[in-house]
Amino acid sequence: MFGFGDLGVWSAYAFTIFSVLICILYGILKWNETDEDTKETGK
Amino acid sequence: MDTLYIGIVVAVYLAITAYLGWLGFKQTTNAADFLVAGRKQHPIIMALSYGATFISTSAIVGFGGAAAVFGMGLLWLTFLNIFVGIFIAFVFFGKRTRKMGHNLDAHTFPELLGKRFDSRFIQGATGLLIFLFMPIYAGSVLIGGAIFIAQTFSISYDAAVLGFTIITAVYVVFGGLKGVMYTDAFQGVLMFIGMALLLIYAYTSVGGVMAGHTALSKLAPEAKILFGKGGHMGWTSMPAFGSAMWMQLVTTIVMGVGIGVLAQPQLIVRFMTVKSNKEINRAVLVGGVFILFMTGVAFTVGALSNVYFWNNPKYQTVAIEAVKMAQAEKEGKVYKPVVSVELTKKREADAAAALLNPALAVKEPAKPAAAVQSAAIAPKTGAAAPAAPAPAKPKASGALTDAIIPLFINEAMPKWFIPIFLITLLAAAMSTLSSQFHTMGTALARDVYEKGLQIKSKNTVLVNRMGTLFTIILSLGVAIYLPRFFETGSAIIAKGTAIFFGLCACAVIPMYVGALYSKRFTKAAAKSGFLAGVAVSLLWMAFIHSAEAAPLGICMALTGKASLLDPRSWISNLDPLIAALPVSIIVSLLVSALTSPMDKEHLKKCFNGIEKV
């Protein structure tokens, strides 16, 4: 289990890495997404 | 040589910070510039500013030291810091906050809530909550920074706290939020570099990732000897479910800080500093990685420091005991650690001997190491100190845990890294403190004085500068007075942070969620949820939660007991957030169901374009 003593800590480690990956993927996928507000004002 | 090197590094750091503060001052011409940084900030500046404000010295040194005691279970807090504090906060709260803030022309978080519910009371009361209680949090960060500066430069605490306050105050008062965000971003970059280097060196010092984790797992018996009575199961395991350590780790540290972040006004205002959702989307990426390198690294390194000290021939014990040894050495004394390589070898030899000769084991039962080895500190003269039993405590004192990371840095890291880490910690403290000063100042000037009390002013920027200056002086007073109120400076840092995070969460989260997501959520629901959250939270702190009830002394004065319940019971260890937030949510929902929704035209204005977000 990656050297950890129990599933509780292993899960914390896994969830942490997973949450960072979500942030990275979200940022990349939505990098150029422009909302309606910006389109309307042309800013 | 070292002093000169440190002096040059600090001087360069302060010069760049001063320049960025001046840049903020030059670009601040109106209230929107001072309060929401002109609403046109770059996503990287916004994300770094958010992250640097979020992470203070106490998160790195205080909570990193706590990880050396509690172990890697603290990574649950890192998960919440990233998933709740960044992803949920930016995607589900940030976009709507930005859009609604634009729709209502709100300049502060209390103003957003006040305008959304068309209530002067809500704006004034939320501003007052920030003005009254944030100085405890700001004072705590100030104390942490000042202690660190005083120790590093060998100056008095009072001189350190005064100097630290003046330097930070100058660029906050004059630079406004632009000055704060520019310096935050610079400080965030320094923090990232410092923590990345720390992670690399820490894993190298314990033989790599897998080897480090495995070695830490093997130290579980020592953890049980030290903290077994509190429920400790080892530094790579969670504490026993429901034990005192589990309650403290899960309800106060992980849940309290992890969820409380959603209601932090100094963070929420940053969503209103960007011009579109594109900036928020991009900031999610930067913010997620940044937080991983802050708390993720601090908690991992804190826990792994046990392996380093265990393998270090000078200490051969775990981190908390190594700190006691180092402190005793400074005082010219010798501290014999409760757990050590030598004692473990002896214990294993005794166990093997007992296995070979069971009769011997019956005659002389093996005593636990903690009972055999007293925690006595004897003078170096060689005179034996009276043997005193060392009871296993559920938690180590804050003063000791806060000393773990600095000791690890001094012992394990190369000498050139020490000034780099000094700047990392200085940047962490200044970035959090500057944002706190700005938020408290605007809460007082904008939300309480101008809007709550409806006092007209000709120069809004000047009024906000005065408000900021006043709250800075107040925080300085707190930083000087608080250490005399509580027992040790370090304990205050954690307590001050937890109190403010919990109080804000209980008071604000139901109304904040209702404001952004429900047209049915009423003004009366917002007010009653706020009052219920604040009342239950304060009562729980004063009468139930022993961590605050005992030092506050209100319960003692009224009932003759430190806490209404047995301090050992699980309820006494339950954080106020866990008790008060459900009450606040239930009261808000009930009142909302029983009262009429707000005017449709007003709601249309608030939610204009929000559904598309």
Image (spheres, rainbow, N blue to C red):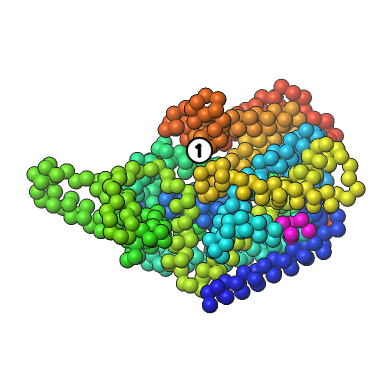
Q: Residue at x 69, y 61 (%)?
A: B167
Q: Furthest residue to the top? A: B594
Residue tagged 1: B547
**In the drawing, does residue B87 fall left or right of residue B22?**
left
Residue B241 magenta-highlighted: no
Instruction: Give the quadrant of the C terminus of chain A.
Output: bottom right
Q: Residue at x 61, y 74 (%)?
A: B8
Res. B454 image quadrant:
top right
Residue B562: x, y in percent? 49, 31
Q: Residue at x 80, y 35 (%)?
A: B120
Read off the magenta span: B168-174
Residue B598 shows in this picture: yes
Residue B33: x, y in percent? 81, 56
**In the drawing, does residue B45 fall left or right of residue B142?**
right
Q: Residue at x 60, y 33 (%)?
A: B537
Query: What amino acid does circle 1 point to?
Result: Ala
Q: Furthest residue to the right? A: B458
Q: Furthest residue to the bottom? A: B1
Q: Nearer the viewer, residue B426 or B484?
A: B484
Q: Is residue B600 above or below residue B324?
A: above
The subunit carrying tag 1 is: B
**In the drawing, does residue B211 fall left or right of residue B520?**
left
Rate crowding at label 1 as few (under 14), some (14 to 19) or many (20 or more) other CA atoms within 10 Å: some
Residue B29: x, y in percent? 86, 58
Instruction: Give the quadrant of the N terminus of chain A.
Output: bottom left
